[in-house]
Image (cartoon, rainbow, N blue to C red):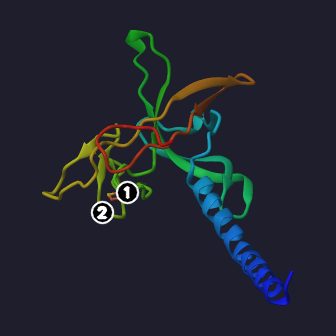
Amino acid sequence: MQRRNLLKWLSAALSTMCASIIAVPGVRYLFATVQRDTPQAVPPQRVARLNDLPIGEPVEAAITGRRRDAWSIYPEETVGRVWLVRREADESAGSGARVDCYSSVCPHLRCNVSLDPSKQSFICPCHRGRFGLEGERLQTDGQRNPANRGLDALPCQIVEVNGEPWVEVTWQEFEPGISAKVTMS
Ligand code: FES
């Protein structure tokens, strides 16, 4: 091989190597970002003792699970928050305790809703979306509610643990900004 050709070949090999050094971490970063944004499945988990929930007064609870970002995996992190509302038992119908559970993620653009100081509704701090204690979308004070649907109810049940009733919730996330309740994939 002539000296000139050898130099050309070496220069091309060196350029390819430099490009790979830059490109490989970039591609890995992009994939990691995609993985980070994918909601992780969280098994049903116990979030509160039934006896700690006052009837008709919402109580907030945390959902823990595995969270991952572009660089790390955190095995035991808060991945979401829920509002639990214990309902009056209907003795005449023979029904026992009932608890409804709502995701605290606002269905408009995913801020976290909080309990209004009056304790009669939930309010979103981002664009003033307001929701009733049954999760319904409210329209109050002539203010437009930007959310297209009410708070997302989550599967929730009462389970016995060592003779004590606990509330168990299955965490799910839903697409924001639309009127239909569609699970995020
Ligand atoms: S994010 Fe809640 S009202 Fe916009």
The answer to which of 13 and 117 lies nearer the viewer is 13
Using residue 171 as the reference point, say whether residue 144 is left or right of it: left
- In the image, which disc is placed on residue 95? none
Mark 1 C-beta closer than 8 Å to ligand 1: yes
Q: Up-down: is 55 above or below 81?
A: above
Using residue 65 as the reference point, say whether residue 158 is left or right of it: left
Q: Up-down: is 153 above or below 144?
A: above
The answer to which of 116 and 178 lies nearer the viewer is 178
Q: Are marks 2 and 1 in contact (CB under 8 Å)?
A: yes
Disc 2 marks which amino acid? His
Q: Position of residue 142 (x, y in %)?
A: 12, 57
Occupied quadrant, residue 73: bottom right
Q: Who's the residue at 58% across and 39% down the image?
A: 52
Query: Dot 2: within a 10 Å radius of its alpha carbon, few (fewer than 14), some, or many (20 or more) residues?
Result: some
Q: Earlier in the sequence, mark 2 or mark 1?
A: 1
Q: What residue is pinned by disc 1?
A: 109
Q: Who's the residue at 78% across and 80% down the image?
A: 9
Query: Dot 1: within a 10 Å radius of its alpha carbon, few (fewer than 14), some, or many (20 or more) residues?
Result: some
Q: Who's the residue at 29% across and 55% down the image?
A: 129
Q: Up-down: is 118 above or below 63?
A: below
Residue at the farthest front position? 2
Q: Position of residue 115 (x, y in %)?
A: 40, 53
Disc 2 element: loop
Disc 1 marks which amino acid? Leu
Q: Position of residue 112 (x, y in %)?
A: 44, 56
Mark 2 C-beta closer than 8 Å to ligand 1: yes
Q: What residue is pinned by disc 2?
A: 127
Occupied quadrant, residue 2: bottom right
Disc 1 element: loop
